[in-house]
Image (cartoon, rainbow, N blue to C red):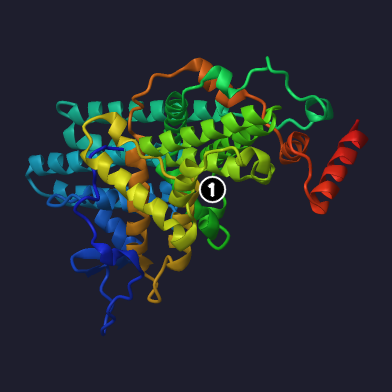
Amino acid sequence: MPQTPIFSSMLGSSCSGQVQPDMGERCVDPVYQDGNLVSGSLEALIERLVPTMDYYPDRTYIFTFLLSSRVFIHPHELLAKVGQICIKQKQQLETGTEAEKLKSFAAKIIQLLKEWTETFPYDFQDEKSMKELKEIAHRITQCDEENGTVKKIISQMTQNLLMALSARSQYQEIREKFRQPVTEKGTILKTKPQSTQKDILSVCCDPLILAQQLTYIELERVSNIYPEDLMQIVSHMDSLDNHKCRGDVTKTYNLEAYDNWFNCLSMLVATEICRVVKKKQRTRMVEFFIDVARECFNIGNFNSMMAIISGMNLSPVARLKKTWSKVKTAKFDVLEHHMDPSSNFCNYRTALQGAAQRSQTANSNREKIVIPVFNLFIKDIYFLHKIHTNRLPNGQINFKKFWEISRQIHDFLTWKQVECPFEKDKKIQSYLLTAPIYSEEALFIASFESEGPENHMEKDSWKTLRTTLLNRA
């Protein structure tokens, strides 16, 4: 995906809702409002995608249409329709005598295919799509058989596509296995870790360095999320109602892996706190993670920050009143203010907007970092999808909806392309990614062993947990 912003000059604030096109005696297809395309039939939108001798679609449209089209039509079907339009235009140009016009047309079609294969390589993973691509390429090369320039460009494009598909395939094969939480009785019950056992502070005691390593992990994992993965949020839901998409819904393994990282980090934070024996050391551990979360916020790594806060707000940690009474909570209160869920996380969204603005004018990669809270980002796309219909009452595609969804996805893609400015520390990252984490049940047991139950409800829970574990032995 090109890094230059493609939405900077597009769409005012008016493009956030559903539009009912003006219906006169006949329906205009497609429909424009204030110069912006807001709806159209699938056929009209496909026509707008394909270049002509005198026209080439702008990049905002190419990205938005190719991203959203999968909700309505398979990529190989879209390719076939694009190919049919290309053949018609080629035949019309061939009836004339100007060979240069034919070459110019061929160059525009190649440019479209190049943008398509570079931005959405996974659209070409199946044989049908590759067959359609080769068919179009074959017809276009006929426009410049003399010097073979077109053929060379297409060959390079195909090679780059195959490399991209291979890289994604390898990632699927080696993607992380979900880290299994520790639940064995012998690991947690009456076997508190010795003071010599490794913990996060023995690996990294500097909050800034740990925040930087968390950011490195975040950017590495975000780099494996693609626009079509995010669009699965829409197409997967629609597949239940759209037989055209039902058989081709891919697993959102990239999204699941990234979401799993958030959960693992939250549980790791809770585990590190709950398994500490001495209250003074637990207090230090809590304050350490508060400082790490604050450094994440300063960097622009909101996802790790939220994961850390979530871990400290888990019941087994939150109930440690004696520990929290010794913690200097002023910093934590500020962090919780930033992540206050009221008014649809208004404070967080303000901070995110500030980070995004800083990123746009930044001169260094350090200042360009923006890592949003991923589950909130996903919910925003889901919300846009749910409140606006895919089609208007006249049957046209509600393209205004997809402008907005694609703009949000493009912002995410721009942020994920930032090269991490921090050097990788293998020792710290190995600990973050492989250190044992407790299950929720194990966390409660460790918590109760650190600070005993204070009321009847907690006493009953503690008794039930001990009995359950002993029965498993």
* Viewer-nearest residue: 7 or 348: 348
Asked if 353 appears above or below 393 in the picture, the reply is above
Left or right position of 211 against 103: right
Amino acid at circle 1 = Asp
Percent position (x, y) of residue 129? 42, 41
Left or right position of 301 against 155: right
Which residue is at the far front? Answer: 326
Circle 1: element type: loop
Percent position (x, y) of residue 276? 68, 28
- Specify the quadrant that holds the C terminus: top right
Which residue is label 1 attached to?
248
- Specify the quadrant that holds the N terminus: top left
The quarter of the picture where residue 215 lies is top left
Percent position (x, y) of residue 183? 77, 32
* Viewer-nearest residue: 453 or 413: 453
Left or right position of 174 against 399: right
Percent position (x, y) of residue 3? 26, 37
Question: Which residue corresponds to the image point at 43% horizontal and 61% vertical from the top-left?
Answer: 384
- Res. 84 in view: yes
Asked if 187 appears above or below 118 in the picture, the reply is above
Question: Crowdedness of circle 1 by 10 Å Cα count: few (<14), some, many (20+)?
Answer: few
Question: Which residue corresponds to the image point at 57% horizontal and 44% vertical from the top-left?
Answer: 310
* Viewer-nearest residue: 358 or 200: 200
- Res. 166 in view: no
Question: Which residue corresponds to the image point at 45% horizontal and 33% vertical from the top-left?
Answer: 224
* Viewer-nearest residue: 463 or 98: 463
The quarter of the picture where residue 164 lies is top left
